[in-house]
Image (cartoon, rainbow, N blue to C red):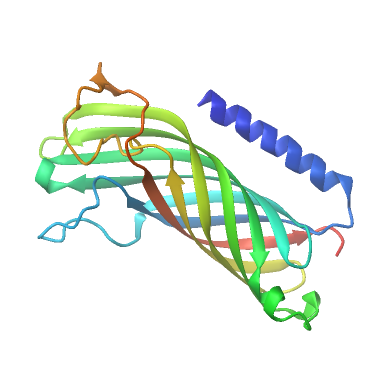
Amino acid sequence: MKSLFFFTLILLVVNTKSYCQDANKQYFISTYIGTIQYYGDLNEQESNLDIRHYFEIKDPLFGFCIGKKLSPYFNTQLTLEGGNFKAFKNSINLSTTTSFYQITQRIEMDIFNLTHRGIPFEKQRFNNYLYVGVGMNGFKSYANELDNDMSLRRANDTKFVLSYGIVFKFKLNSNTALKLDFGHNKVYSDIFDATIDGNNDDLGKVKDKKISSYRTALDMWAGLRVGVVFNLGKK
């Protein structure tokens, strides 16, 4: 977790200094809530359909963004978010609970502006963006037996994450917009869910009920976010 803290601090300093250097550049802040879809060792399809393949409100996601418009076609954005989710798999009698915090630096490309260059920005009501970002994910995950909730093992680590997705924004006025954000996040670890290769055993890697930090495959999570954007500064 210390590496996540220092990574966050560095990005905050760099972004804040960048915004203060040029007051004529438009910048913005955003806050949002959402829900999580997990993809990993425990989301295989079961015959009785007891594994989730859809978003659920009980897996919450919260976030805050600060960003800057670099040009008519590109934005940069620093995103801080956190959430938790639960997953289970009956065939191996296993359930897991994961909580995480994540920071990513994004680059957004305004698709609407690229395809509608004749429309001035102040007259645009709807914009859609493609984005890609990199960052760090710090997580704590616990694995339990499904039938009696007995603790089996835990994972606690900070790993590199690759983020990509699409954002839709609808402008209410010159200062405020609504947004819908859907994105995938690839966590460079196979212990994001405290489970290795979909097996309910330690594979010789568990010591003192704590999984060692290593990777055989990548776990992922997707976020569906709804939020408000506030445009600040001079246009």
Residue 17 placement, left or right of 89:
right
The quarter of the rendered structure image containing the C terminus is bottom right
Q: Which residue is drawn at 14% across and 57% down?
A: 46
Residue 203 placement, left or right of 38:
left
| Observer able to see residue 172 | no
- In the image, residue 95 sits, relative to residue 211, either above or below, namely below
The mark tally for this picture is: 0
Image quadrant where residue 228 sits = bottom right
Q: Residue at x 74, y 43 (%)?
A: 15
Residue 1 placement, left or right of 41:
right
Residue at the front extreme of this rendering = 216
For the residue pair 186 and 193, the one nearer the viewer reads as 186
Image quadrant where residue 13 sits = top right
Residue 12, percent from left and from top: 70, 38
| Observer able to see residue 217 | yes
Q: Which residue is drawn at 77% across and 71% down?
A: 174
Residue 107, percent from left and from top: 65, 55
- In the image, residue 71 sits, relative to residue 146, either above or below, namely below
Residue 123, percent from left and from top: 77, 81
Q: Which residue is drawn at 72% across and 62% down?
A: 74
Residue 3, percent from left and from top: 55, 26
Residue at the top extreme of this rendering = 208
